[in-house]
Amino acid sequence: MSIDVNNESGTEVDEQAILDIARYALARMRIHPLSELSVIVVDADAMEQLHIQWMDLPGPTDVMSFPMDELRPPSKDDDEPPQGLLGDIVLCPEVAAKQGAEAPTQHTMDEELQLLTVHGVLHLLGYDHEEPDEKAEMFGLQAAIVDGWRGERGMTGPSPAPTVS
């Protein structure tokens, strides 16, 4: 799996954890090991510009996903996963820090960035949360991936609750 993490935000973030959880999520979703993903960490001003340009919404947001080859997880366990360019995930640590601090189960900026990375991966794979049933599926899968990753690392305590909308 080729995953690039590029921190352009000026904020120190745990880039290795972002890389590791992205790799874990893609493996768990059975995405071809030769697929490519880019994660870019930006400041609030850059995220606001992207949010306005692509969503026509004011202010910075937490995560944005820009799919490329529209890869999807294989439909059956024995299907060969497709290979390709997944796309870009853009994260904003300033928004992540605020969301983590305001969440019912307060957590760190890095924990929120890990959650947002999984959220972005799922969006790249075609998951969405506009409808209640879609939201339940996506957020359930997101929690299972984050919990699995944390469990493999022996991390204790509750996983961050979804704060993305």
Image: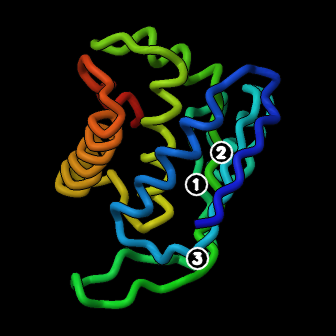
10 or 67: which is nearer to us? 10
Task: Check the image and name the residue furthest to the bottom.
Answer: 79
Tell me: 32 left or right of 146: right
- Say few, some or many: other residues with alpha carbon within 10 Å of mark 1 (under 14 / 14 to 19 / 20 or more): many
Please identify the quarter of the rendering in which residue 58 is found.
top right
Q: Earlier in the sequence, mark 3 or mark 2?
A: 3
2 or 94: which is nearer to us? 2
Residues under numbered marks 1 and 2 in contact, where contact means CB atoms less than 8 Å apart: yes
Image quadrant holding the N terminus, namely bottom right
Secondary structure at numbered mark 3 = loop
Residue at mark 1: 65
Secondary structure at numbered mark 1 = strand
Secondary structure at numbered mark 2 = strand
Q: Is residue 85 above or below residue 143?
A: below
Amino acid type at mark 3: Leu
Amino acid type at mark 2: Val
Image quadrant holding the C terminus, namely top left
Q: Earlier in the sequence, mark 1 or mark 2?
A: 1
46 or 109: which is nearer to us? 109
Residue occupying image coordinates x 67% and y 42%? 51
Residue 34 is marked as 3
Q: Earlier in the sequence, mark 1 or mark 3?
A: 3
Residue occupying image coordinates x 59% and y 22%? 95
Residue at mark 2: 90
Q: Is residue 145 above or below residue 160?
A: below
Q: Is residue 149 above or below residue 121?
A: above
Q: How many marks?
A: 3
Residue occupying image coordinates x 27% and y 35%? 151
Amino acid type at mark 1: Ser
